[in-house]
């Protein structure tokens, strides 16, 4: 699979099955293709867990409102939209996607981990979903040659799982989650260097990199080093963290434009590499499984607040050129 394979091209038969919005979705998919875009733009994907356990019928209409053509479906405990898919049935979910002109961009599965994604591969294939995200697995706290060796062993263990995913047109992205084998810039670089197939990608989370001392400049350098092996960029900063219950205004400091983290350098790096993956505006509420704000309308408004911050930075780049 090439980097361009992450650009979704909805099969004709899937369009024909959908009763609403087929032609419009096809047109928008063409615009999203990297070679056809005019200028550089972020490709937004909406994480279902930002709305807690609200129903998919309430979440999917919000995607277009936050500039997202794609939805990232999360299971319990962060949300329960993956479980909702099974409850309503895949045909009903497909119709719901078509009604709201949203494409399934990702199935996130920290619950399953990297070695148990097999049952989800045919689901991803069913919806022409190009990506699954999870964390890594292996010893923690390593550095230097020990870290490189462990990452190499992890990559070797992933090979049969990647082969199954690749046969279905799906990539697996590993997030640099805290307290994990893959949690540092070096581990991410070695993941890309040592992977057995290019279907193994990176889901890049600034929140966790901040936790290990990576600042804005370091993040930008890492983006340049990884290039378009990054499948997902989480627009997410550490703020005051996401594990202790805080007043809502402090919890929201995880969002771009709220906390102290300046996204200008990382965004410039994304522009330089012509980033063609997904961008998710992201945070974790406390406790998990609730919307980031009480209602879908308030949550959407807050996501758009962060999107405006990112887009204003990007507009500044354009003006400078």
Image (tube, grey):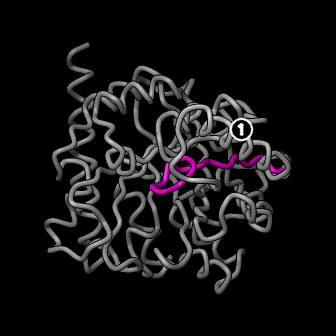
- x and y, in percent, of residue 128 in the image: 71, 54
Name the quarter where the N terminus is drawn: top right
Q: Which residues are magenta?
A: 168-182
Task: Identify the residue at the far top of this view.
Answer: 321
> Helix, strand or loop at disc 1?
helix
Tell me what residue is drawn at x 44 percent, y 29 percent. Answer: 222
Above or below: residue 283 compared with residue 144:
below
- Quadrant of the snapshot with the C terminus: top left
Residue 267 higher or lower than 251, as above or below: above
Q: Is residue 228 magenta?
A: no
Residue carrying label 1:
152
Figure check: 152 above or below 237: above
Q: Is residue 57 visible?
A: yes
Q: Residue at x 59, y 81 (%)?
A: 84
x 63%, y 41%: residue: 201
Q: Position of residue 190 (x, y in %)?
A: 61, 32
Q: Is residue 105 visible?
A: no
Instruction: Report how many numbered discs are placed on residues in the image.
Output: 1
Point out residue 149 in the picture as x, y percentages from the top left corner: 68, 37
């Amino acid at each position: 699979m090439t980097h361009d394979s992450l650009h979704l091209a909805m099969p004709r038969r899937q369009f024909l099955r959908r009763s609403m919005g087929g032609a419009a979705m096809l047109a928008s998919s063409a615009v999203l293709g990297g070679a056809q875009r005019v200028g550089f733009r972020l490709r937004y994907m909406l994480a279902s867990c930002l709305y807690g356990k609200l129903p998919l019928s309430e979440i999917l209409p919000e995607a277009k409102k936050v500039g997202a053509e794609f939805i990232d479906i999360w299971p319990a405990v962060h949300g329960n939209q993956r479980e909702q898919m099974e409850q309503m049935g895949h045909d009903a979910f497909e119709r719901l996607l078509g009604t709201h002109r949203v494409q399934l961009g990702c199935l996130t599965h920290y619950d399953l981990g990297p070695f148990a994604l097999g049952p989800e591969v045919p689901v991803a294939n069913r919806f022409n979903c190009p990506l699954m995200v999870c964390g890594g697995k292996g010893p923690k706290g390593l550095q230097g040659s020990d870290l490189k060796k462990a990452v190499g062993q992890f990559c070797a263990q992933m090979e049969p799982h990647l082969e199954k995913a690749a046969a279905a047109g799906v990539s697996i992205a590993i997030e640099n989650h805290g307290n994990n084998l893959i949690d540092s810039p070096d581990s991410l670089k070695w993941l890309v260097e040592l992977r057995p197939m290019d279907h193994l990608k990176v889901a890049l989370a600034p929140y966790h990199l901040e936790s290990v001392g990576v600042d804005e400049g370091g993040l930008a350098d890492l983006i340049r080093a990884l290039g378009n092996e990054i499948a997902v960029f989480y627009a997410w900063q550490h703020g005051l963290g996401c594990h202790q219950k805080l007043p809502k205004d402090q919890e929201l400091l995880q969002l771009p434009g709220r906390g102290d983290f300046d996204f200008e350098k990382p965004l410039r790096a994304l522009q330089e590499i012509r980033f063609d993956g997904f961008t998710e505006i992201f945070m974790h509420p406390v406790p998990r499984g609730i919307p980031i704000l009480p209602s879908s309308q308030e949550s959407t408004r807050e996501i758009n607040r962060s999107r405006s911050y990112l887009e204003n930075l990007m507009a500044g780049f354009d003006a400078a050129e």
